[in-house]
Image (cartoon, grey):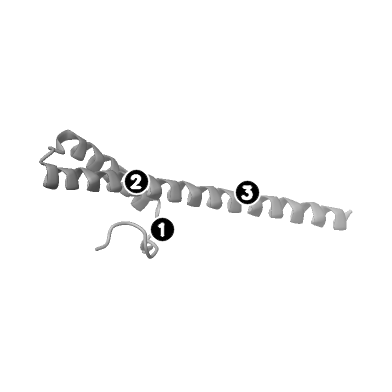
């Protein structure tokens, strides 16, 4: 029975590791989706600024809303990031 118990233990550990890996993958997907959302909002913000500067169309409250949404997403991503981690190249605003 010792061999069977060892096999069960190994299978249990493998299942736990698989669950951890699946959780990490889901977190990464969630982060990528949030980053894409922030990028889309930033693109919209850019178009509003261009319209304001070229056509005189006031960006007003829409600008404030977009900035607030981007700020919330960035704060969420920063809170989820491991300590000492920096955004990958090509992600987020340039500093």
Q: Distance between the residues labelled 3 and 2?
A: 32 Å
Question: What is the secondary structure assignment of the residue under circle 2?
Answer: helix
State whether residue 43 is above or below residue 90. Answer: above
Rendering coords of residue 40 (x, y %): 34, 46
Camera-side residue of 73 and 9: 73
Tell which tag, 2 or 1, sits nearer the viewer. Answer: 2
Q: Residue at x 44, y 51 (%)?
A: 32
Q: In this view, does 88 lie to the left or right of 56?
A: right
Rendering coords of residue 39 (x, y %): 34, 49
Q: Name the residue under label 3.
A: 19
Mark 1 residue crowding within 10 angstroms, few (<14) / some (14–19) / many (20+):
few
Q: Name the residue under label 2.
A: 40
Q: In this view, does 61 lie to the left or right of 90?
A: left
Q: Is residue 73 left or right of residue 68?
A: right
Q: Which residue is drawn at 23% across and 43% down?
A: 67
Q: Which residue lies furthest to the front in this view?
A: 55
Q: Mark 2 touching mark 1, by CB under 8 A?
A: no
State whether residue 51 is above or below residue 10. Answer: above
Q: Name the residue under label 1.
A: 82
């Amino acid at each position: 029975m010792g061999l069977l118990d060892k096999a069960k233990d190994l299978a249990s550990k493998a299942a736990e590791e698989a669950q951890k890996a699946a959780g990490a993958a889901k977190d990464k997907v969630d982060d990528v989706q949030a980053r894409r959302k922030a990028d889309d909002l930033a693109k919209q913000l850019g178009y509003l600024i261009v319209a304001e500067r070229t056509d005189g169309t006031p960006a007003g409250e829409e600008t404030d809303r977009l900035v607030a949404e981007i700020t919330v997403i960035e704060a969420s991503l920063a809170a989820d990031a491991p300590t000492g981690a920096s955004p990958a190249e090509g992600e987020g605003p340039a500093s």
